[in-house]
Amino acid sequence: MSFLCAPMAELSHRALRELIEGFGGCDEYFTEMISAAALFGGGPFEVWYMDSGPRPEKLIFQLVGADIEQIVKAAALLDRQECAGIDINMGCSAPLIRKTGAGVAWMTSIDRAGELIGRVRQAVKRRLSVKLRIGFEDDFDYLVRFCRRLEAEGTELITLHPRTAGEKFKRKARWEYVGRLRQELGIPVAGNGDIASAEDLLYRADGSCDAVMVGRAAVRQPWIFAQARKTLAQSFTNENAIEETGLRFLELLARYQPPEFHLSRARRFFAFFCDNLKWGNYLKNQLNREHDLPGIERVWREYFREHEPA
């Protein structure tokens, strides 16, 4: 059973990977969505999205886009970097992404999605995977037909987030669809959704899927994968120091992300990580008032002096 760290906008960057690796790591890390169009637009930040450290052999580049030619070119470029594979995003349901024809919009046409995967398969040598949702309707038969076409065109792994395109996180993920889809396909199937703890991760690693992908919980608990592994070995002791972990993240963020990203990435991280603290919401508000990393670090340290027991 493999444990995967999900692609998350403004979160799945090298600083988070370094933090998770420090606790023991996971089996694979998916990058945040990389825009196929932006990759060739000469933007100043693409080099940061393409950073495959600290473990290139575990790194999966995820591509998002609406144009077949652009995605094929981008996939070929990323395939030449150090990495373990290329993933195509067919699951993002954010309105701005869907409106362009990217993300889950690919699931409206089996033929067009199949054409894309066939073209990408010809362009890349590394493992090719797809992350998707159930579709626009709760139609398991359509999902199976869609995935069988992707498999026929060369997809080697499918990750299913078992919600429809219009469903938010309040709707419970249909994990039974993950197991059912695995029975219908000849390639590995990973499941993603509603993992909030190491116990949830272990519960889903029950043999009904080939891998479990963790999203926001891996930000709240960068030790979640290590905790699950050690729980399997019945030897886990929670010795995680929240203050030190937050400071370590700020250090890694400054080292591995450009200054233009520091504030947004720090706010995104602490929006989840502060959930570990009794007065987490208060602290989030305090951190959000700061405008640089030194200010965030100062507020973070002051919180522990004032609120946490010695």
Image (tube, rainbow, N blue to C red):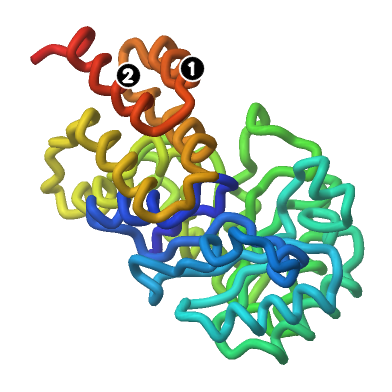
- Residue 200 visible somewhere in the drawing: yes
Q: Do the residues labelled 2 and 1 touch (CB within 8 Å)?
A: yes
Instruction: Tell me the kind of residue under disc 1.
Output: Arg
Residue at 74 percent across and 52 percent down: it is 134
Question: Looking at the picture, does residue 37 appear above or below residue 126?
Answer: above
Quadrant hosting residue 78: bottom right
Left or right side of 125 for 231: left
For disc 2, the marked residue is: 299
Q: Position of residue 306 (x, y in %)?
A: 21, 8
3D distance between C-alphas at marks 2 and 1: 10 Å
Disc nearer the start of the sequence (2/1): 1
Residue at 51 percent across and 81 percent down: it is 81
Question: Looking at the picture, does residue 201 appear above or below residue 112?
Answer: above
- Residue 206 visible somewhere in the drawing: no
Q: Where is residue 122 in the image (x, y as percent from the top left)?
A: 72, 91
Quadrant hosting residue 131: bottom right
Residue at 8 percent across and 15 percent down: it is 310
Please identify the residue farthest to the left as the structure is shown.
310
Q: Where is residue 204 in the image (x, y as percent from the top left)?
A: 44, 49
Mark 1, Cα crowd under 10 Å, few <14 / some 14-19 / many 20+, is few
Left or right side of 26 for 44: right
Question: Looking at the picture, does residue 260 appear above or below residue 60?
Answer: above
Residue at 55 percent across and 81 percent down: it is 127
For disc 1, the marked residue is: 289
Callout 2: helix, strand or loop? helix
In the rendered image, the quadrant that contains the N terminus is bottom left
Viewer-closest of 92 and 81: 81
Viewer-closest of 223 and 148: 223
Viewer-closest of 43 and 210: 43
Instruction: Tell me the kind of residue under disc 2.
Output: Val
